[in-house]
Structure formats: C-alpha cells, structure tokens
C-alpha cells in the first residue's frame, strides 16, 4: 500500500491559529515535509513546532521551492521535490507537507500535489486559516458585508491592473514590488491597511498608503476597501 500525501495548512503565523486537525496530523504521522532547504529555518516549521513541540523529533523532509520566475528552475525543483515525496509514499508511509496559511490559496504545495497525483498517488488537503482572514481579524474589520464583492489578487503578478472593480481588494505577495503597488493603491482612492508578518513576533500594522514602507517584507498583506 502506498502512503498518502497531506497538504496541511499551519495558518498565517500565530501558532494558536493552527487547527486541531493540523496538530493531530503532525502528531500522528512520522514524516513531515516542509518547503525549504533547511527545515528548521522555514517559517512553516517555526510556527508548527510551537504548537507541536514533538515535531522537532520527527523525520523532517526538506523540499526546496525556489523563489524565482525562471520556468526551467521551477520545473527542475518541482520534479525533484515530487520524487522525494513519492519515495516516502512508495515505502507505505504518509507524508504531511506543512504550508503557510491554507493549502488551497496560492500555495506552493499545489505544484507538488498536481505532479504526485499525476503519478498515481493519493493526496488530501487540510485547510488552515488564511493570511487575509487573520489580518482582517487583527485589524478588527470585516472583509466584506452584505453584497460586497471581494477580490483576491497576487499583486506582484498583476502590476498592470488598476483596482477599479466594485468591492474590496486583498493584495497578496506585494513585498518585492511595494513601491509600484503603492502607486496603484494611491490612484484607487481606497482605504488602505496593511499587516506585515501577521501573528509573528515582528508583526507591523500600517494605516494608509503613506505609512507603508517601500521595503516591506514578503509576508505583507494589503486590504483596500471602498471608501464609505
């Protein structure tokens, strides 16, 4: 019998926001995979180990997922990662792959999931609290009310788009192009809030475009609401 690959969301940063199911999955399985060259240096591991200290004694499998747009490099590393996971599954062992937030939303796990499934293995997803829901809660605001639309945009890939649709926007992955994103936000006339490193020790909250630094980190999430 082949093992099952589980994509498990560990939430946005605060270990208290990990689900009971995520904690159980880590405790019940011996092999834990994490996206990164050095498992114990990854954000996902640092979050999870606070909620599940015994994680440190598990068999830890690093899966290198480079931060690049080079198709060839991505292809090579995704293929290599899938094969590493499949070697464990072939031995009849389940693998829990930890991913930030929720594995269904812009997750690195999806690239591996597609490959592993195509090779005939079984996978399952365990939902986690998303970064944008956690950020909204931290800001004590709603993301949408009544019939408002909610647009979720990976900002770094959509710098040619203006925020002209009705409703509210969530901009994810904005850090590397923050100066350009701020220009778009300024033109939108929307009420802008940003949470950097939500739920982590170095969390920062910014009110308005003018407060947001150009060198904001990768884990920066922006909420842009229609002005009322």
Image (tube, grey):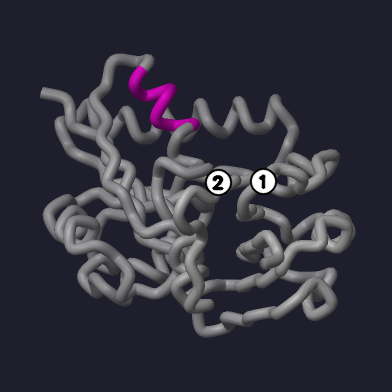
Q: Nearer the viewer, residue 1 or 108?
A: 108
Judged by its main secondary structure, the magenta piece is helix
Q: Position of residue 22 (x, y in %)?
A: 24, 57
The N terminus, quarter of image:
top left
User: For residue 182, what is the image quadrant?
Assistant: bottom right
Mark 1 or mark 2, earlier in chain: 2
Q: Position of residue 60 (x, y in %)?
A: 33, 54
The residue shown at (51%, 61%) is 143
Q: Position of residue 193 (x, y in %)?
A: 66, 72
Where 152 falls versus 27 (above or below)?
Answer: above
Specify whether residue 116 is painted magenta.
yes
Badge count: 2
Specify whether residue 97 is painted magenta.
no
Asked whether residue 17 is in view, the answer is yes
Q: Nearer the viewer, residue 190 or 38?
A: 190
Where 172 falls versus 20 (above or below)?
Answer: above
Q: Position of residue 147 (x, y in %)?
A: 49, 48
Relative placement, left or right, of 29 versus 189 is left
Relative placement, left or right, of 69 versus 22 is right
At numbered mark 1, what does the secondary structure look like: helix, strand or loop? loop
The C terminus, quarter of image:
bottom right
Report the Cα–Cα distance between label 1 and label 2: 7 Å
Q: How packed is label 2: few (under 14 Cα within 10 Å), some, or many (20 or more)? A: few
Q: Do tag 1 and tag 2 residues touch (Cβ < 8 Å)?
A: yes
Which span of residues is magenta-colored? 111-117
Where 218 falls versus 158 (above or below)?
Answer: below
Where 155 falls versus 145 (above or below)?
Answer: above
Q: Which residue is mark 1?
A: 166
Asked whether residue 83 is in view, the answer is no
Q: Which residue is mark 2?
A: 149
* The label number, if any, that marks residue 150 in the structure image: none
At numbered mark 2, what does the secondary structure look like: helix, strand or loop? loop
């Amino acid at each position: 019998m082949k093992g099952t690959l589980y994509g498990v969301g560990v939430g946005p940063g605060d270990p208290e926001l990990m689900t009971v199911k995520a904690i159980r999955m880590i405790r019940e399985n011996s092999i834990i995979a994490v996206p990164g060259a050095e498992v114990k240096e990854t954000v996902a591991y640092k979050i999870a180990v606070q909620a599940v200290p015994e994680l440190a004694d598990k068999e830890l499998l690093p899966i290198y997922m480079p931060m690049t747009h080079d198709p060839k490099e991505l292809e090579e590393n995704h293929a290599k990662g899938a094969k590493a996971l499949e070697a464990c599954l072939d031995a009849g062992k389940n693998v829990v792959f930890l991913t930030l937030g929720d594995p269904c939303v812009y997750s690195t796990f999806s690239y591996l999931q597609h490959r592993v499934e195509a090779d005939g293995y079984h996978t399952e997803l365990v939902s986690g609290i998303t970064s944008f829901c956690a950020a909204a809660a931290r800001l004590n605001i709603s993301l949408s009310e009544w019939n408002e639309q909610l647009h979720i945009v990976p900002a770094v890939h959509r710098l040619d788009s203006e925020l002209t649709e009705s409703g509210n926007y969530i901009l994810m992955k904005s850090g590397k192009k923050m100066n350009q994103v701020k220009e778009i936000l300024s033109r939108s006339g929307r009420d802008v809030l940003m949470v950097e490193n939500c739920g982590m020790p170095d969390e920062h909250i910014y009110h308005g475009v003018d407060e947001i630094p150009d060198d904001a980190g990768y884990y920066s999430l922006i909420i842009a609401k229609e002005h009322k």
